[in-house]
Image (cartoon, helix red, strand yellow):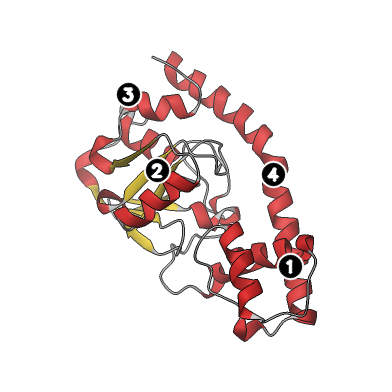
């Protein structure tokens, strides 16, 4: 019980710290949408694959937009990255009122980070792999029959595709934060995970079966 209380407190502190960056991203995406409507041929914009930095270069090379300043290019890149969520046919569709059973946040606010577990035909949504793994690993804090889990799905960081959590590759503790801070960031292929790890200073690349309770706790700054 003490462990989960500590985790909950730390998660709340992390949430407060990350709210400002999340709001910034949302505002940039909204600004980018306005710019794209006026100054870009949207059908020529690149797909939302890659980092913001790589998207900026792809937008430049696509010549889809009139000459843009660095800040406007960044905003359009955030729009491309986030705007594709609504049109992606294979992403995890999160109900508007779905709350993460670990932290209580509305998952639909963070669709790019969505994860899902199907337990006894009921879907449970999470605002990141870290919270999903807490729900899965800490059986003393979250009591349910693990044998009743029929599906675990995560969102590929680059493509947003819904992928089998047990077949994904995860980058641990990179310089890219999720809604709840440091994360386990999922990828469909080992290659994309490896490239992301090298580019974003990830500490390790792991498979589902290699994720441990101490690894998850360390993401919240809790050492055993």
Left of 118 or right of it: where is 4?
A: right
Residue 128 % position (x, y) = 47, 45
152 shown above or below 41:
above
Is 220 placed left or right of 145 in the picture? right
Residue at 55% in and 44% down = 176
Discs 3/1, front: 1
Query: Which quadrant would residue 79 be assigned to in this image?
Result: bottom right
The tag earlier along the polypeptide, 1 or 2, is 1
Q: Quadrant of the C terminus?
A: top left
Q: Quadrant of the N terminus?
A: top left
Q: Of the residues tagged 4 and 2, which is closer to the observer?
A: 2
Q: Earlier in the sequence, mark 3 or mark 1?
A: 1
Q: What residue is disc 1 on? A: 32
Q: Tell me what residue is drawn at x 56 percent, y 62 percent.
A: 54
Separation (CA) of disc 3 from disc 4:
33 Å
In space, the residues marked 1 and 4 are separated at their CA atoms by 16 Å
Label 4 CA crowd tier, 10 Å (few <14, some 14–19, many 20+) = some
The residue to which callout 2 is attached is 171
Most foreground residue, 41 or 115:
41
Instruction: Kindly identify which numbered label has been placed on residue 179.
Output: none
Number of other residues with Cα within 10 Å of mark 2, as a class: few under 14, some 14 to 19, many 20 or more: many
Name the spot of residue 192 as percent of width and height, x first.
38, 56
Disc number for residue 21: 4
First reached walking from the N terminus: tag 3 or tag 4: 4
Q: Which residue is mark 3?
A: 140
User: Which type of secondary structure does the marked residue at label 1 adopt?
Assistant: helix
Residues at circles 3 and 1 in contact by the CB criterion of under 8 Å: no
- Of the numbered discs 3 and 2, the one sitting upstream in the chain is 3
Q: Are marks 1 and 4 in contact (CB under 8 Å)?
A: no
Give the mark, 4 or 2, whose residue is nearer the N terminus: 4
């Amino acid at each position: 019980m003490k462990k989960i209380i500590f985790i909950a407190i730390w998660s709340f502190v992390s949430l407060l710290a990350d709210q400002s960056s999340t709001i910034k991203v949302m505002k940039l995406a909204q600004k980018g949408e306005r710019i794209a409507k006026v100054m870009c041929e949207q059908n020529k914009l690149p797909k939302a694959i890659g980092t913001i930095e790589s998207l900026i270069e792809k937008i430049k090379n696509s010549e889809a937009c009139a000459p843009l300043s660095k800040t406007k290019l960044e905003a359009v890149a955030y729009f491309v990255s986030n705007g594709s969520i609504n049109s992606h046919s294979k992403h995890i569709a999160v109900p508007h009122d779905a709350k993460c059973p670990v932290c209580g946040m509305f998952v639909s606010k963070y669709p790019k980070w969505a994860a899902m577990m199907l337990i006894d035909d009921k879907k449970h949504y999470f605002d990141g792999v870290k919270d999903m793994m807490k729900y899965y690993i800490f059986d003393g804090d979250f009591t349910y029959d693990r044998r009743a889990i029929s599906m675990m799905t995560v969102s590929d960081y680059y493509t947003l595709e819904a992928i089998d959590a047990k077949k994904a590759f995860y980058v641990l503790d990179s310089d890219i934060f999720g809604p709840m801070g440091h994360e386990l960031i999922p990828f469909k292929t080992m290659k994309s995970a490896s490239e992301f790890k090298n580019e974003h200073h990830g500490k390790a690349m792991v498979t589902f079966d290699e994720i441990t309770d101490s690894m998850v706790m360390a993401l919240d700054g809790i050492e055993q």
